[in-house]
Amino acid sequence: MEKTDSLDDSKSMDRISELPNDILQRILYFLSQEDAVRTSVLSKSWRDIWRTRPNLDFRGPFNLNDLKQKFLSLVENTLQRYCDHRLSLEEFHLHIWLDDFWYQKSVSLLEKWIPRLKNMGVKEFRLSICSEHYPRYTDLDLPCVVFEQESLRHLRVRRFKLDRKAVERIVLLNNLRSLHLQEINIEDEEVFQKIISNCPSIETMRIENCEGSRNINVDNLRRLKDFHSSGFNLGVANTERCSFEISHQSIETIFITYGNLLFHKGVEFRFLDVLRLHGVRLLPDNLSSCKFPSLKRLVLDHCDGFEVIELFIDAPKIKSFEYKGNFVPSITFVTTQNEWDSHIFVRSADASSSWWFIKLNELLKSLSQSNIRSLAIYYIYHPRNIVHEPQFVILDKPVVVESVKLKCDNSTLFSPLLNGVFRIFRPRNICDFDMVAWDMDVIECLWKIFMERESGDKDEPFRRFWKRELEE
Amino acid sequence: MAAETGTPTTLTLKSNDDELFSVAESAAILSVTIRNMVEDGCAGGVIPLDNVDGKTLASVITYMNGISAIPADEEKKKSYRDKFLSDKDFETLADMVLAANYLNMSCLMDAVSAKIAQVMEKKSVGWVRRKFGIENDYTPEEEAAVKEEHKWTFEGVETDDDN
């Protein structure tokens, strides 16, 4: 409030109400709908000014039936007023909830309102349409009128069935910049493609908890900057994953949880800044042949498809790499950066095999061009696997790792794990040993390892620290 | 800031209280009203601006010069505008918005309108009335009826510090 004090007007002359209407409309343009509507109570001359401003933003009440009727009439009357008085409306935002009871009424009003917007001069139409139909929300049809207004700039739809009928009247939506689909049952790929081919200017696309289409192909969206998809499933009994194809031309961020990612071979993702993949199957050969000249952050979290194939990531500007998974991957970064971080988390049930340690050693060696900020190993006991001490010799100098977290759920695993890991890297900090049973065996074993290593290089301060701890 | 060829052209503007101001044409044509006059060839002598007083015109010219000195960088222009308006009281802002409207300067018009709107943001009706000296001419019944019409917009505002 302080910064506005200079505006305090001690004279009680009401200059603001005397300003011409077009100026007042401009002032109200910069207010939220709530603030603008509230000015109607100021005095009689203010009563209808908000209903002449060039922008309207209606957010319907959720789940309040007595207000719902009021809300629908308010929108209806306001739009009617703009038409009757030939007022120009530049921006129209509508956020509407549909439910069983009001569905027919609301749809018939939308059918009336949306086609009118063009003649009213609307340049920017933002529509958010959600159903309260729960739990079988996907039975409710998305009214096809939502795809019929070319001034549509932003569209968010939630909890509907999106089928052929919904897109049969779709027009070219050249102004649509952002499309947000939540909990939508997309009938099939064709329906989705029909939408995409009519919305060539989409820059932001979010798909959350949708189902149906096996393919989400947005390769035609040449202006797409942000792509986000999470929780896409193909039906309850189906374990298949949806496949995503994304154009490389303008994309800046990709975030996908669960799916297949189809990258074309050898393309350059010039603007891609962040690539975050969770539970995604990759085509390793294709990924390895792509170029990522702007990529700063890469996250591969429980991804697969590259268990036995080496990945090359051509990312000269990489800043941060995070890997989480159940296998030790082979990854090589092609980069000129020398200040970048990596974080690794591996879970394994066969971490006592020498082969596993050799793979881990190779990964750490390859990532040693970065600062390996953290390495977490979760070693799971599996009765099928025979636990044995790893037998391997590493000739190179051990890699330095900033901080290490080790976790195993059975104390018989502890000795082989420690024996293995200290052969291949040197932690600056050991932040956590998480044992199910911290018994004397474990401590003895740790002690033995440190004593053995005492004969080697002594410049590791942590060891002295641990030695003292363990002596006790 | 200088005109494309040779010496910069200067215009003379006259306020409604007969003050004269010299301003570079390149800065003055931020006003569509002045630009049209220049293009129509009426800029030879003095350009009379009948709806703007000297004090306001001086302020508008400061703005014209300041903003046209900034190269095409929206961020910098925005911060100049914020700074320019930061110490203005409402009287001055009201004069400026009228002048901007008359001179057809959309960037100044928007900036001042947004600045005035900012004062009303999330404020109760009583607070806004007091701030701008607006007299409530509704009867209590009428006021209640208007409020009832838009029930949900009267929640979540700063408490009415009327009392």
Image: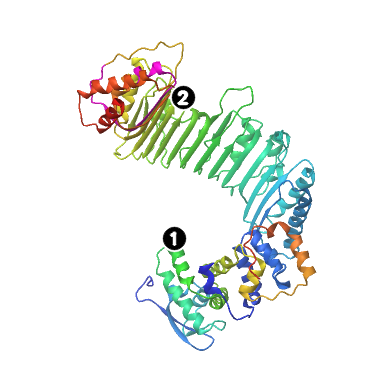
Seen at 78% across and 72% down, the residue is B139
The x and y percentages for residue A50 are 68, 65
**Which residue is label 2 attached to?**
A304
Q: Which residues are magenta?
A: A393-417
State whether residue A241 appears in this view: yes
Q: Residue furthest front?
A: A472
Image height of A257 relative to B10, above or below: above
The picture quadrant where one finds residue A421 is: top left
> Residue type at mark 1?
Glu
Q: Using residue A279 as the reference point, say whether residue A458 is left or right of it.
A: left
Q: Are marks 2 and 1 on the same chain?
A: no
> Residue type at mark 2?
Asp
Give the spatial CA distance, label 2 vs label 1: 44 Å
Q: Using residue A42 as the reference point, say whether residue A390 is left or right of it.
A: left
Neighbour tally class for label 1: few under 14, some 14-19, many 20 plus, Cα within 10 Å: few
Image height of A353 relative to A251, above or below: above
Q: Which marked residue is nearer to the observer: mark 2 or mark 1?
A: 2
State the residue in front, A148 or A301. A301
The x and y percentages for residue A125 are 64, 52
Circle on res. A361: none
State the residue in front, A359 or A311. A359
**Which residue is label 1 attached to?**
B75
State the residue in front, A221 or A398. A398
Seen at 40% across and 23% down, the residue is A438
Quarter containing the N terminus of chain A? bottom right
Residue A409 in magenta stretch = yes
State whether residue A172 appears in this view: no
The x and y percentages for residue A44 are 73, 72
Neighbour tally class for label 2: few under 14, some 14-19, many 20 plus, Cα within 10 Å: many
Image height of A148 relative to A442, above or below: below
The x and y percentages for residue A413 are 39, 17
